[in-house]
Image (tube, rainbow, N blue to C red):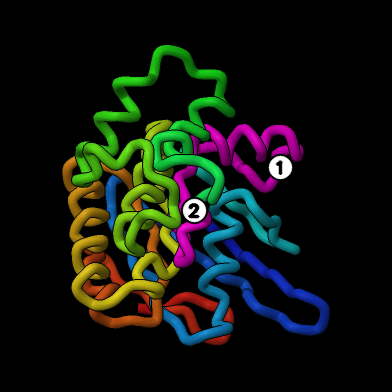
Amino acid sequence: MIQLAGIEKSYGDNRVLCGLDLAVTAGTFVSIMGSSGSGKSTLLNLVGGIDRPDRGRIIVNGEEITGYSEGQLTLYRRKRVGYVFQFFNLLPNLTAYENVEMPLLLNGAKGYEERVTAQLNSVGLGGKEDAYPHELSGGEQQRVAICRALIHDPDVILADEPTGNLDSRIGRHIMELLEGIAEGRGKTVILVTHDVVVAGYGTRILRIKDGTIGQ
């Protein structure tokens, strides 16, 4: 489903990715481990269409997104990718419901009210629809973020240290949610982490070092 070939990426004089190759089969949960600054987040940003490589090709479902215009990349991010961040990135002036519905609004969807409510119910947040982020615990905020990532039924879920801002108990619950999503909904999940316990939820564990991927 996802193929990266010969990916190179530098920021100024800092060469982050050096001819990286990666192939991910549809419906798998891939964990990518690496130390801070190893290029984990850069890799996710490239797959997610947030950034572009200096060299190489990125192919998703048979389409080379490295050849996309900015407009095409915007639509790719809106429709085909769901992103879960370490620091949740919820809009503080919107309720849980409004944060989750945002991707649908951007995509011009209609008649989705029950869908948003059902998504929140599925992660145990029934009754929290009208709560603002500051009224929610860290684990609840991350569950809202997961709902937001899933609500537009994307092909790919990208998770960047999704438990890094949570305690171990809540982090375990979040990882079980992501694991269930990958297994139950057949989603392709790419997670990056430095935590071996978190990485263990993946069905495939890879390591990034010196700008390349190894087993």
Q: Secondary structure at mark 2?
A: strand
Query: Tag count in the figure?
Result: 2
Quadrant where the image shows the N terminus: top left
Q: Nearer the viewer, residue 39 or 61?
A: 39
Dot 1, how many residues are within 10 Å of its Cα: few (below 14), some (14-19), or many (20+)?
few
Q: Which residue is mark 1?
A: 67
- Magenta highlight on residue 87: yes
Residue interval drawn in magenta: 62-89
Quadrant (top left, top right, bottom left, bottom right) of the C terminus: bottom left
Task: Give coordinates of residue 40: x percent, y percent.
Answer: 51, 72
Q: Is residue 162 left or right of residue 122?
A: right
Query: Is residue 182 shown above or below 103?
Result: below
Tell me which residue sits at (27%, 74%) in the image: 198
With respect to residue 78, does 35 lie above or below?
below
Q: Which residue type does callout 2 highlight?
A: Gln
Q: Position of residue 30 (x, y in %)?
A: 33, 62
Residue 58, image x, y percentages: 58, 52
- Which element is circle 1 on? helix
Residue at 49 percent of width and 53 percent of height: 3
Front-lying residue, 30 or 103? 103
Residue 56 lies in magenta, yes or no? Answer: no
* Label annotation for residue 3: 2
Quarter of the rendering containing residue 105? top right
Query: Between 33 and 108, which is closer to the camera in this rendering?
Result: 108
User: Looking at the picture, how far across and down is residue 57, in whole percent?
Assistant: 63, 54
Give me the C-alpha separation between circle 1 and circle 2.
14 Å
In the rendered structure, are the residues bearing label 1 and label 2 in contact, judged by CB atoms less than 8 Å apart? no
Q: Residues within 10 Å of mark 2 (few under 14, many from 20)?
A: some
Q: Is residue 137 left or right of residue 41?
A: left
Quadrant housing residue 13: bottom right
